[in-house]
Every structure is written in structure tokens, then in C-alpha cells.
Image: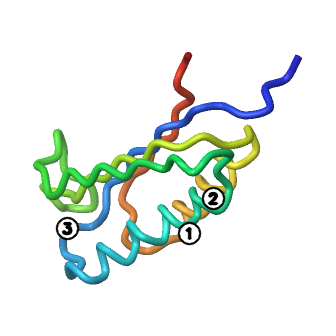
Amino acid sequence: MAKLSAKYETLFILDPNLSEEDTAALVEKFKALAEQYSETDTVVVDDWGKRRLAYEINDRPEGHYCLITFTSKPDFPAELDRVFKITDGVMRSLIVCKEE
């Protein structure tokens, strides 16, 4: 039987050259999107701030990391991944389903 909802985590890295306001706006955008499609009211945002990358991405040695944990239907992560890909300022993103 297919799952009706599942817990997910998404980690994304933003361009460190963005202003603090732009970074906060992008984090809020993705949080609002997760809240919109969330099955529960529990959307947890853990902003890690700027960290050194293991290897350079787009000639940048650092990135602004953010982790969001949420519960949603299985079709939402594909939409979130599409939004990550078309948003300027997102260097990398990863969405995983947490096993319960």
C-alpha cells in the first residue's frame, strides 16, 4: 500500500554572496512552501549559516546551509526539487525521506 504521508528532510546550500535579506527571504520562501504542503503544523527550520564546502561549487569555497524537516504527501518533494532548480541563489539541494 502506498504511503499517504512521510517525514522528509531537505538540505540546501545558498550562494554566500547573497545579502542577509535575500538569504532570509529564500529560507522563508522554502519554509512557507513546506508549510503549505505539510500534513502537520510541524515544519522545523535549522539555519546552519555559512560553512566551508568540501569542494568549490561555482568557484565559491563557502555556502549558506539550511535544513528543513517536514511531513508531506509523497508528490511534494518532486515539486520542491523543481523549485530549488529554478531558484537563483540555490547552489545545491537534497531531499531525503526519513525512515520511521
Amino acid type, callout 1: Ile
Please tell me whether mark 3 sits on a helix, a strand or a loop.
loop
Mark 2 surroundings: few (<14), some (14-19) or many (≥20) residues within 10 A:
few
Q: Can you give x and y, in whole percent of width and height, for residue 100 in the image?
A: 56, 16
How far apart are the alpha carbons under marks 2 and 1? 7 Å
Residue 75 location, quadrant: top right
Q: Is residue 74 left or right of residue 51?
A: right
- Image: 68 above or below 2: below
Residue at 19% in and 61% down: 59
Crowding at mark 1 (Cα within 10 Å: few <14, some 14-19, many 20+):
few
Q: Amino acid at mark 2?
A: Arg
**Does dot 1 land on a helix, a strand or a loop?**
helix
Residue under the image location 52 percent in, 33 percent down: 96
Image x and y of residue 58, in percent: 27, 61
Indicate whether 25 appears above or below 83. Answer: below
> Does residue 18 lie above or below 50 as drawn?
below
Amino acid type of the residue that numbered disc 3 sits on in the rendered structure? Pro
Label 2: element kind? helix
Measured along the vertical axis of the image, is residue 92 above or below residue 87? above
Q: How many other residues sit within 10 Å of disc 3, few (<14), some (14-19) or many (≥20)? A: many
Q: Is residue 74 left or right of residue 98?
A: right
Reading the image, the residue beneath label 1 is 86
Quadrant of the rendering where the N terminus is positioned: top right
Residues tagged 2 and 1 counted as in contact (Cβ below 8 A): yes
Which residue occupies the foreground of this view, 22 or 91?
A: 22
- The disc, 1 or 3, on the residue closer to the chain's N-terminal end is 3
Q: CA distance from mark 1 to mark 3?
A: 18 Å
- Circle 3 is placed at which residue position? 16
Judging by the rendered image, the residue that carries numbered circle 2 is: 82
